């Protein structure tokens, strides 16, 4: 190739952000494959040969070695001089049985149904709307699709959300002084794990979980649920329980502004005078790199026509619902706690 039209050789070499396209593309697929195969679980705290791993995972040993060799170059797994394989600090997070496991999140993000939707991202950029119905025109929404078409995908989705949420609960529970409240209502709190975490630190709080009826019935079966009170309902309709504070973690990013406003207005109706609203969400900063947060923002746009929001966007949304944003508190995770009061 002639470089005579360039000022120097360097101008013909793509910068890392561009050259990284292929490695990052292949890395995401490689991570999905080893997560589906459960390679990190097979290794646990042992060293195994590729032959042993291939037999246990029903794969071709030579091809599996090449895949693990690639991942080892990213410090995900280690290939030893004798060609035995072991986990690294990074690949430990691909195990199913560790706190903060990312296995199901990677399985979800790399699944065929997810990529079928993400491949329509250009449609979202052109229209400003979710590409879900373009990808799956016969399904009303993602949750109907899981229920009627792909229950296996729905199971991985739920497991992914649970594992991701669990890794964030401790940081949300320890980054705010909940002891000032006599009662706390968690809206859309899934299995109630965050409430249990807060209750373990502040046992005097009356903690109530607000969730859909079928979720409440499942949660009540767990022995640990006896420390909680419950309200079954739909946060788009009515919230009956009154509490000193309402907590809503990692929920609003699933909904567009109109739907989020409806949720917040119902929270406003349920809060007594002097009550507080606590929202735990990621915050986008347009002036910081935030590669993970801004990548998730594109996923939310394409998948659900929703968004990760800036502080200014939350301030505006809260004002429309009758709240004033009073504080933004960082945690030791990507989440911030946004405190607001009714006005």
Image (tube, rainbow, N blue to C red):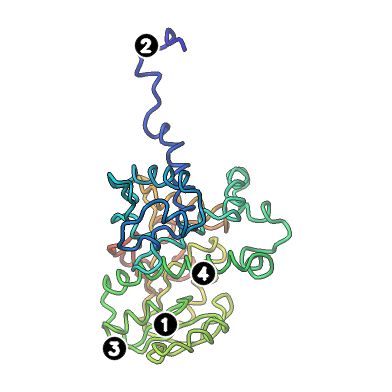
Crowd band around label 3 with a 10 angstrom C-alpha radius: few (<14), some (14–19), many (20+): few
Of the image marks 2 and 1, the number of the one nearer the N terminus: 2
Question: Disc 4 vs disc 1: which is toward the camera?
Answer: 4
Total labels: the figure holds 4
In the picture, the quarter occupied by the C terminus is bottom left
The foreground one among 78 and 122 is: 78
- The residue under label 1 is 185
Residue displayed at 39% across by 42% down: 70
Disc ID at residue 158 = 4
The foreground one among 280 and 270 is: 280
Of the image marks 4 and 1, the number of the one nearer the N terminus: 4
- Residue most extreme to the top: 4
Q: x, y percentage for residue 108?
A: 51, 59
Of the image marks 1 and 3, the number of the one nearer the N terminus: 1
- The residue under label 3 is 203
In the displayed structure, would residue 65 be above or below residue 94?
above
């Amino acid at each position: 190739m002639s470089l005579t039209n360039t000022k120097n050789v360097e101008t013909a070499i793509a910068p890392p952000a561009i050259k990284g396209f292929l490695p990052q593309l292949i890395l995401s697929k490689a991570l999905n494959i080893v997560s589906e195969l459960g390679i990190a679980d097979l290794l646990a705290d042992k060293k195994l040969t590729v032959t042993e791993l291939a037999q246990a995972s029903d794969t071709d040993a030579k091809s599996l070695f090449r895949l693990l060799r690639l991942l080892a170059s990213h410090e995900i797994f280690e290939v030893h001089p004798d060609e035995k394989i072991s986990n690294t600090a990074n690949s430990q997070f691909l195990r199913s049985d560790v706190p903060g496991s990312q296995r199901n999140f990677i399985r979800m993000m790399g699944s065929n149904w997810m990529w079928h939707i993400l491949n329509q991202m250009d449609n979202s950029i052109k229209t400003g709307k979710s590409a879900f119905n373009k990808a799956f025109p016969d399904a009303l929404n993602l949750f109907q699709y899981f229920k009627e078409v792909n229950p296996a995908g729905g199971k991985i989705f739920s497991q992914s959300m649970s594992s991701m949420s669990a890794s964030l609960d401790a940081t949300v529970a320890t980054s705010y002084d909940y002891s000032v409240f006599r009662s706390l209502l968690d809206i859309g709190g899934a299995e109630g794990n965050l409430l249990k975490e807060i209750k373990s630190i502040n046992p005097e709080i009356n903690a109530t979980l607000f969730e859909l009826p079928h979720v409440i019935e499942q949660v009540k079966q767990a022995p640990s649920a006896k420390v909680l009170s419950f309200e079954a309902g739909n946060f788009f309709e009515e919230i009956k329980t009154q509490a000193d504070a309402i907590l809503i973690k990692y929920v609003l990013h699933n909904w567009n502004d109109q739907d989020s406003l409806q949720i917040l207005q119902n929270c406003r109706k349920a809060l007594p005078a002097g009550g507080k609203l606590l929202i735990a969400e990621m915050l986008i900063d347009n002036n910081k790199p935030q590669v993970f947060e801004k990548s998730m923002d594109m996923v939310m746009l394409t998948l659900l026509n929703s968004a990760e929001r800036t502080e200014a966007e939350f301030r505006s949304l809260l004002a429309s619902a009758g709240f004033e944003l009073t504080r933004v508190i960082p945690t030791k995770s990507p989440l911030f706690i946004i405190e607001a009061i009714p006005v």
